Image: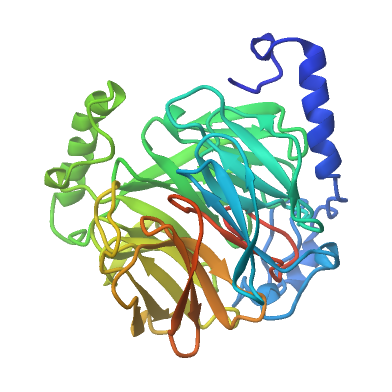
């Protein structure tokens, strides 16, 4: 069911009731005033997207997500971990103090990620109803931990926000497009087609908020989106062999060759023999100059130079590289390796977490999971002492000690995916499981 304000949803009264219910769970916050030249100067000369909060430290865009820097908007939030169980159509709620599941509630079909709103007042569960037409977004009130009425939204695999808070960006993966919606009612405003980016799913934004990089899981690539002019700037093939002559052109042809088969439903993902990678999560370096792209097929992270939009390095990490999370002091990048190259996955795979130092781009530690596991998506606790990750194919959640790498497990529902830890430090959310700045 497509939620675009048109008659396909049914009667206008039904739509209005759904929107009103959802808005009650996500009241608008005041959007900051547009930046001026003097403000840009005070922020290190970075001319940000109008309406976006200024960059306070141009050498560290994560400066406001340091441990304990909680915004007033989250003052009443319960300390909880919200886990979307894709296979159970539910959300498990964990009390991190006791490591116990304190609540479980049903949501829509195929919940993929729990996403903090731009104003930090609502957590949205993205239920993309894969292969169906009844996708939805379920709001959670973080002050009570309880869900509100779901809003019908077409194919919300993932959810982001423009850095000025003006739009929600629903990642409609199956339709190869980005749907820009009202951030409170979720009414469709406009879309950006991304036909060269099949499997579009995860993203991060430039330091000035004017561009975003989205990964193309089924094309082995990443697309650069111009937020201001609402267009795709370009698409870059990714491979550890990027220095070899002609390899990028060869991979682009292979991606184009298999696209018709994928569109007809003959392929789910990309077969290994194609030579294409499967990019997943993406994160900017603290200074915004590099973007790190996890690749579950190539078992490592691609380093993309933002300005030239070229791959400049590849860092091997572990099998099935998937989720990327900066430490609270912005010194390290925690990398979840799911333990398998297959989208189907398996339990007790050789999953692990790799720690890369931002300054040197070198691996400094690896945390294996005793008896194996499948660490996927999650985030870091407010104090930075723990990294929480879903165990996608083991039906558990992992809590890693960020000092020692020791891990404990909590049993949840079937196929947990993009969990979020709440509250988290930061002034505003860009989306996913808590990409705050």
- Is residue 226 depicted above or below 264 in this figure? below
| Figure check: 281 above or below 256 | below
Whether residue 422 is situated above or below residue 164 in the rendered picture: below
Extreme residue in the bottom direction? 404
User: How many numbered marks have been drawn onto this rendered protein structure?
Assistant: 0
How far across and down, in percent of the image, does residue 181 sit?
A: 68, 33
Answer with left or right where residue 87 lies relative to residue 127: left
**Drawn side of residue 361 relative to residue 435, left or right:** left
Quadrant of the drawing holding the C terminus: bottom right
Q: Nearer the viewer, residue 388 or 270?
A: 388
Residue at image location 27% in from the left, 70% down from the top? 318
Q: Residue at x 70, y 11 (%)?
A: 10
Q: Position of residue 296 (x, y in %)?
A: 29, 57
Q: Quadrant of the N terminus?
A: top right
Among the 4 quarters of the image, the one containing residue 96: bottom right
Q: Is residue 306 visible?
A: no
> Residue 222: where, in percent of width, then height?
38, 48
Q: Is residue 5 visible?
A: yes
Residue appearing at x 57%, y 45% in the figure: 90
Q: x%, y% of residue 311? A: 32, 60
Q: Which sits in the foreground, 317 or 32?
A: 317
Pick the residue in front: 103 or 167: 103
């Amino acid at each position: 069911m497509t939620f675009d304000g048109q008659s396909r949803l049914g009667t206008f009264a039904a739509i209005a009731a759904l929107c009103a219910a959802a808005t009650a769970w996500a009241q608008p916050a005041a959007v900051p005033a547009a930046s001026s030249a003097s403000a840009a100067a005070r922020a290190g000369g970075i001319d940000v997207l109008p309406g976006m909060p200024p960059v306070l430290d141009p050498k560290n865009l994560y400066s406001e997500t340091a441990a304990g820097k909680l915004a007033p908007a989250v003052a009443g939030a319960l300390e909880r971990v919200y886990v979307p169980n894709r296979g159970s159509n539910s959300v498990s709620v964990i009390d991190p103090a006791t490591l116990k599941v304190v609540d479980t509630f049903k949501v829509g079909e195929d919940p993929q990620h729990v996403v903090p709103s731009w104003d930090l007042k609502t957590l949205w569960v993205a239920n993309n109803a894969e292969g169906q037409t009844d996708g939805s977004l379920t709001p959670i009130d973080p002050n009570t931990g309880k869900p509100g009425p779901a809003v019908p939204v077409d194919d919300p695999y993932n959810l982001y926000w423009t850095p000025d808070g003006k739009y929600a960006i629903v990642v409609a993966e199956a339709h190869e497009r980005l749907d820009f919606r009202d951030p409170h009612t979720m009414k469709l405003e406009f879309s950006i087609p991304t036909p060269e980016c099949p499997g579009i799913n995860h993203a991060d934004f430039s330091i000035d908020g004017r561009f975003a990089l989205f990964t193309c899981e089924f094309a082995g690539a990443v697309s650069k989106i111009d937020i201001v002019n609402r267009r795709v700037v370009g698409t870059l093939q990714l491979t550890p062999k990027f220095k070899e002559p002609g390899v990028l052109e060869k991979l682009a042809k292979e991606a184009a060759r298999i696209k018709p088969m994928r569109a007809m439903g003959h392929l789910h993902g990309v077969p290994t023999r194609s030579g294409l990678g499967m990019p997943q999560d993406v994160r900017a370096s603290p200074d915004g100059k590099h973007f790190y792209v996890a690749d579950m097929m190539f078992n490592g992270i691609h380093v993309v130079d933002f300005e030239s939009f070229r791959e400049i390095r590849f860092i091997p990490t572990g099998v099935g590289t998937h989720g990327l999370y900066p430490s609270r002091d912005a010194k390290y990048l925690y990398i979840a390796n799911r333990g398998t190259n297959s989208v189907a996955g398996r339990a007790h795979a050789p999953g692990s977490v790799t720690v890369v130092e931002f300054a040197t781009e070198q691996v400094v530690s690896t945390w294996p999971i005793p008896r194996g596991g499948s660490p996927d998506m999650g985030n870091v606790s407010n104090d930075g002492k723990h990294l929480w990750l879903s165990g996608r194919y083991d039906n558990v959640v992992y809590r890693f000690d960020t000092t020692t790498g020791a891990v404990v497990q909590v049993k949840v529902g079937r196929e947990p995916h993009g969990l979020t830890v709440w509250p988290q430090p930061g002034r505003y959310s860009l989306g996913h499981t808590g990409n705050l700045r």
